[in-house]
Every structure is written in structure tokens, then in C-alpha cells.
Image (spheres, helix red, strand yellow):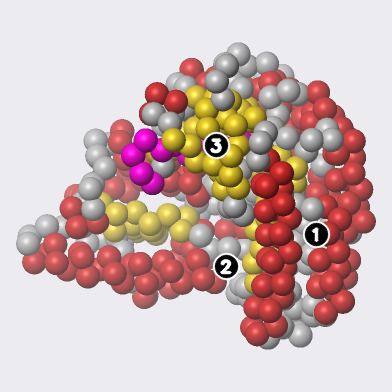
């Protein structure tokens, strides 16, 4: 979501006549887009700001001014901290108000030195005020839903991104068609709780994610559809059927479980048990036996015992995730879990994370190794580290490196997989 927000912010700036600077030292305007999900991410902002202030001072000595802005969830949660710890910041905007950048920049440019903070939950939707979304190349993000009503007890999102809102069906379809006309072959629908999407159609009727996916599947020129991130309890039969019926829907689903222990899931205020999660996975696999799953995990949630942690390992052994994201629990001020007793020692969290990641990586590596020898359609959308190399994604979201000229960029190409590591594949062009 932050990559997407940054893309939209860059478009606002381009509309205002800004061009990309080659380095921080030559930038007249620097905006940090920030994440508040875990403490480490939030703290990074302050050290980055400190470093930027030094550059700002050097530029000032040369008679050059730098406008510094902070946007995103850290602003929503820590606006006073920003003003106190980094008083040189010119403006700070929450994730729902960055469409107001033009008016704020205009004010600052007029009266440099003024600090403005805007962390309102606005009545208007930013999507109605932003310049049209533009293609990011072969793969584009399209936000369809924002915010979350789930209030998992560890999570800041409902407080920083606000309550759930869904964009109207017609707006999404129109935007998707525009992205395709600009060269997008793949669209990844985004939302903090994307599968609880309930946007209105033109007649005012509420429609679900499955309805939207079916509509998108009809768009000519669109080859691949993904959606992320889903909440297990909101996966309904309609959505499951899409994985059977829609050829453009990729066979990869990110479905976070967080923990395999029912008592921890309850303490997390998750609306599902591990059994219900496994049942959903089972139904999805029945709909499409080729589906691969990924998940998010938190270890060391308050009160997590060795037995609770073992239950998480059990789920991993059952589902055999092909990718996963795992984190040590991070205590976030203002969330209920931060006040829970039995907070887990850092040492234990670290040990558990290592054990979990070793297991997750073993399944990921196994899946990647099994891909060797297969031919897969790969969508290339990035340059590799060296000349003549491109990076793309398989249908299963595996990163793939290939020695290919840039004429293959933003195209889907059949590739024979020749090598695999935990994090990526290599392959060669499959001659037709
Ligand atoms: N500590 C650790 N991980 C967290 N996540 C959300 N909040 C926290 C927290 N307080 C993780 C969850 C979520 C992912 C985006 O970040 O696993 O799915
Ligand atoms: Fe946070 Fe996701 Fe839970 Fe919403 S569903 S509160 S975004 S972890």
C-alpha cells in the first residue's frame, strides 16, 4: 500500500511541475512516506529525518532551501512527536489526506518555515481529489478499499488508516481499464482488508470482491489479477468460486493467519480459529488444486507459550506455505495488546522467529526447487542488477532473473526455470 501511495504522491508532484532529483543533496523537496506497523519502521523515520536535516543545513549554507514533508501512518499516530523531535519538518500529512499536498505546498512555498499538520479523517475521499492513477509498468497497484474494522489487538492500522471504506465499482473498473490501456498486464487490487470490499455499483447496490473480480476478468488486455491482503474470516464461497472460474486470477493467495494457536488468535481478536483457517485453505484448494498460499505470522504475542508456538509450526507443516512474512510481536502504544500481561522476552521472540523462519524457508525452497525444469509465463517489469538482466514474477509471485534484453520488459514471456534459491529463480527464454 505504501508503494502505491508513493506512486500517487509522485504523480501529484509531477502535475505540479516537480521532476525527480538525482540525489537528496539536489532535492528541493523531500517527502518521507512512513509505516507505523512495527516499532522499527516507525523509529527509522526519525533517524532518516536527522540525516536529512544535516543535508538541509549543508544546502542552507549554499543558499538553498529544502522543503521536508512526512506523510503516512507515523504522522497519524505520532504527529506531536514529529513536531517535537524534528521541528524542521515543514509539513506532515496522514495517509488519508495526502491529496491536499498541492494546497499545502503552495502555502509553504509562499511562507517558508511554517509547519502544517493535517491528520484529519476527512469527510471527502482522497480518491476523488487525486490525479488519475497511472500505470506502474507491466504490473500496477489499484487501491479498492482502505482502512480496517477488525481491530486485531496488536495492530495500529484501524487507528492510522481509519475505518473501512470501499471505492465504487465503476471507479475501479474505469481505473483498471485506464491502467490496461497504458500497458498494465497485471493489476493487484489493494486494501488492508481487501476481501471485505463492499463498493457500490452504479445503481447503488453493494457489491463484493467476487463481483469485482468477475468484472475485471472481462477486461480485454488484462492478463493477470491479484488481490491483497485478505482476512481469513471474510473469504466466502463466492470468492472461493472465483479461484475456480477466473482464468486471469493468479494461483497465489496471501492469507495471513498470524498464529496457529486458538487461544492466541482469541487474544489477538481474530475472528477465526486455526481449524477454520485450514478449512478455508482446503476449500480453496478444492476450487483450484494449483493454488499456492502465503501468510503473515507474529511470534511472541503476549502470553504465547511453547505449546502455542508449536501450534503455529503445526499449521505451517499442514499448509506448506510457498512464501511467508514473519515478525516478532512489536508493542504498539494505544493498542490493547500493549497493555496485556505476560509480554514475551526479546530473547524468546528471537529464538521463536528463527525456528519459524527456518521451517518457512524450507518449504519455500522446496517449492522453488520443484519449479526447476518447468515452463512458466513470467511478467518482466524490472531491470536486473547488471546490464542485460531482467526481473519478473511467475504466477506464484516468485522473483525470476533472466538474461534478457529490455524489449522483453513489461511483457509476459514463457521461461524455462533453470535454478532456484529460497528467494528467487533463474530461467531462460523458452523458444516457441
Ligand atoms: N507486531 C508485529 N507484527 C505486526 N503486524 C501488524 N501489527 C504488528 C505488531 N504489532 C504484522 C501482521 C500483519 C502484517 C502486515 O504486519 O502480521 O499481517
Ligand atoms: Fe491490522 Fe490486518 Fe487485523 Fe486489520 S485485519 S487490524 S489491518 S492485522
Residue segment shown in magenta: 385-396
Asked which quadrant contains residue 415, the reply is top right
Asked which quadrant contains residue 10, the reply is top left
Answer whether residue 256 is visible to the viewer in this image.
Answer: no
Local crowd size for mark 1, using a 10 Å CA cut-off: few (<14), some (14–19), many (≥20): some
Is ligand 1 within 8 Å of the beta carbon of the residue shown at mark 2?
A: yes
Q: Is residue 383 left or right of residue 284?
A: left
Q: Is residue 153 above or below residue 207?
A: below
Dot 1 or dot 3: first in sequence order is: 1
Q: Is residue 78 left or right of residue 418?
A: left
Which numbered disc covers residue 38?
2
Q: Which residue is mark 1?
A: 316
| Residue drawn at the location 75% of the way across and 46% of the way down | 293
Local crowd size for mark 2, using a 10 Å CA cut-off: few (<14), some (14–19), many (≥20): some
Decide which of 431, 293 is in the foreground and name it. 431
Answer whether residue 353 is visible to the viewer in this image.
Answer: yes
Q: Is residue 84 left or right of residue 424?
A: left
Which numbered disc covers residue 427?
3
Asked which quadrant contains residue 336, the reply is bottom right
Which residue is most to the top? 220
As helix, strand or loop, the secondary structure at mark 2 comes to loop
Where residue 426 sits: x, y (%)? Answer: 54, 41
Where residue 430 sits: x, y (%)? Answer: 56, 25
Amino acid at each position: 500500500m505504501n508503494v502505491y501511495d508513493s506512486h500517487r504522491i509522485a504523480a501529484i508532484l509531477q502535475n505540479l511541475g516537480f521532476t525527480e532529483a538525482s540525489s537528496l543533496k539536489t532535492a528541493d523537496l523531500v517527502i518521507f512516506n512512513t509505516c507505523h506497523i512495527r516499532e522499527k519502521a516507525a523509529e527509522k523515520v526519525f533517524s532518516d529525518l536527522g540525516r536529512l536535516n544535516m543535508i538541509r543545513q549543508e544546502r542552507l549554507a549554499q543558499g538553498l532551501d529544502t522543503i521536508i514533508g512526512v506523510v503516512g501512518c507515523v504522522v497519524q499516530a505520532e504527529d506531536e512527536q514529529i513536531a517535537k523531535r524534528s521541528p524542521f519538518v515543514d509539513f506532515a500529512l496522514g495517509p488519508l489526506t495526502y491529496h491536499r499536498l498541492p494546497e499545502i505546498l503552495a502555502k509553504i512555498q509562499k511562507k517558508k518555515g511554517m509547519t502544517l499538520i493535517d491528520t484529519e479523517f476527512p469527510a471527502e475521499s482522497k480518491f476523488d481529489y487525486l490525479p488519475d492513477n497511472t500505470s506502474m509498468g507491466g504490473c500496477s497497484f489499484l487501491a479498492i478499499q482502505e482502512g480496517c474494522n477488525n481491530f486485531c489487538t496488536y495492530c495500529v492500522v484501524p487507528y492510522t488508516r481509519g475505518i473501512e471504506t470501499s471505492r465504487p465499482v465503476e471507479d475501479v473498473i474505469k481505473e483498471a481499464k485506464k491502467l490496461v490501456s497504458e500497458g498494465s498486464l497485471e493489476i493487484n487490487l489493494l486494501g488492508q482488508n481487501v476481501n471485505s470490499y463492499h463498493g457500490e455499483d452504479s445503481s447503488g447496490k453493494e457489491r463484493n470482491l467476487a463481483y469485482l473480480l468477475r468484472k475485471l476478468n472481462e477486461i480485454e488486455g488484462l492478463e493477470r489479477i491479484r488481490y491483497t491482503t485478505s482476512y481469513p474470516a471474510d473469504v466466502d464461497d463466492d470468492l472461493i468460486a472465483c479461484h475456480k472460474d477466473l482464468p486471469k486470477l493468479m494461483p497465489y493467495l496471501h492469507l495471513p493467519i498470524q498464529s496457529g494457536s486458538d487461544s492466541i488468535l482469541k487474544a489477538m481478536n481474530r475472528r477465526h480459529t486455526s481449524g477454520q483457517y485450514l478449512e478455508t485453505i482446503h476449500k480453496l484448494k478444492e476450487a483450484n488444486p494449483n493454488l499456492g498460499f502465503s501468510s503473515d505470522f507474529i511470534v511472541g504475542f503476549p502470553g504465547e507459550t511453547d505449546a502455542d508456538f508449536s501450534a503455529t509450526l503445526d499449521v505451517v507443516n499442514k499448509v506448506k506455505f510457498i512464501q511467508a512474512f514473519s515478525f516478532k510481536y512489536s508493542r504498539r502504544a494505544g493498542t490493547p495488546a500493549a497493555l496485556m500481561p505476560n509480554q514475551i522476552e526479546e530473547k524468546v521472540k528471537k529464538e521463536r522467529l528463527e525456528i519459524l523462519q527456518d521451517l518457512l524457508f524450507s518449504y519455500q525452497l522446496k517449492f522453488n526447487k520443484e519449479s526447476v525444469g518447468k515452463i512458466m509465463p513470467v511478467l518482466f517489469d524490472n531491470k536486473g542488477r547488471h546490464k542485460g538482466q531482467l526481473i519478473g514474477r511467475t504466477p506464484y509471485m516468485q522473483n525470476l532473473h533472466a538474461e534478457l534484453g529490455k524489449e522483453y520488459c513489461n511483457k509476459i514471456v514463457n521461461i524455462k526455470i533453470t535454478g532456484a534459491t529460497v528467494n528467487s529463480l533463474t530461467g531462460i527464454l523458452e523458444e516457441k
